[in-house]
Structures are given as structure tokens and as C-alpha cells.
Image (spheres, rainbow, N blue to C red):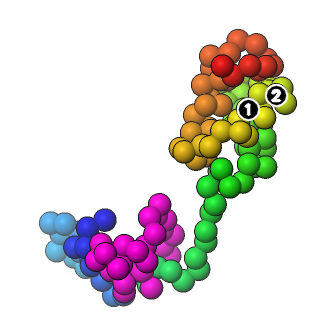
Amino acid sequence: MSLKTQSKILRVLEEKQFQRVGGSRTLSVNVRVIASSNKDLEKEIEKGNFREDIYYRLNVIPIEVPSLRDRVKDIPLLVETFFAECAKKDRSEKKKMIQKAVDMLCNYSWPGNVRELKNLVERLAIMVEKDVIDDLW
């Protein structure tokens, strides 16, 4: 986010009002903001890429979510959940995966995080004709 945009957002958060682009009315807002970043914002502040004042305005309740590779134990449950979502969406039978295939998923580093896992599970649900997935490669 550009420094100019950060400035505008900070102003809205502090004044609780804004004007639409091209508008003439001032609108009042009462909002709570949930923001996330894949960058280390403290380092971005040091580099001059992120404003310190907006950082402290937004950092009221910090929540750190570890990457999927740091919570491998969640993978089996996520696979089950994503297969259930696919079955519900497609009105089909929920696919299952044998333990060997789940173990293969657990041994992968997941650079794309949970989104990558979800995409793989959706692809398997669509492409594999069998109800039980026993091989990934």
C-alpha cells in the first residue's frame, strides 16, 4: 500500500469520516478494521515503506498465524474439511484419502500455504474419479 493511501486510511480511522471520490458529502463511519500482511511491518517501517503511526493504530490486538509448514498436524483436518466443502458444493460423495497420501501432503513444504492445499484438494476432488484417493503422483 502506498504511503499516500496509508495517510488517507489513517485520516479516516482518526476522524471517522471521509468523502467519496467526486462526492461533496462527508460520510461518517464507525468501523473496526482487521488487517493482515505477509510482510514484517516493523522492518517495512525501518525501510520507510510503512507509516509507524498507522502501524500502531492498527496493531491493537495482534494475531500471528503460523504458516502451514509450521502446523503440519492441521493438514489432515484441513484436507477433510476441503473435501467436505467440495462434496457439498458439487452435491457429490465426499472423497477420502488414504494415510500414505496424507503423509505425502504432510511432508511437503507448502510455499503457497493453506490456499495451495485447498487448490490441490479441489483439483483432486474434480479430477480423481475414485472415491478413495490412494496416490498423489
Say which amino acid is labelled 1.
Answer: Met
The residue carrying mark 2 is 100
Look at the image and tell me whether residue 93 can be seen: no
Residue sitting at x 82%, y 28%: 100
Residue sitting at x 47%, y 60%: 38
Q: Tell which of 116 and 125 is nearer to you.
A: 116
Q: Tell which of 97 and 95 is nearer to you.
A: 97
Residue sitting at x 54%, y 83%: 60
| Disc 1 and disc 2 in contact, CB within 8 angstroms | yes
Q: Label 1, label 2: how many angstroms apart (C-alpha)?
A: 6 Å
Q: Is residue 134 above or below residue 15?
A: above
Residue 25 lies within the magenta run = no
Q: Residue 16 location, x and y as percent?
A: 37, 83
SS of the residue under disc 1: helix
Disc 2 residue crowd, few under 14, some 14–19, many 20+, Cα 10 Å = few
SS of the residue under disc 2: helix
Say which amino acid is labelled 2.
Answer: Lys
Figure label count: 2
Which region of the structure is painted magenta?
Answer: 29-56
Q: Residue 71 location, x and y as percent?
A: 72, 54
Task: Residue 1: name its quadrant.
Answer: bottom left
Disc 1 residue crowd, few under 14, some 14–19, many 20+, Cα 10 Å = few
Task: Residue 135: name its quadrant.
Answer: top right
The residue carrying mark 1 is 104
* Image position of 37 (left or right of 108): left
Residue sitting at x 60%, y 25%: 123
* Image position of 27 (left or right of 37): left
Task: Residue 79: name its quadrant.
Answer: top right
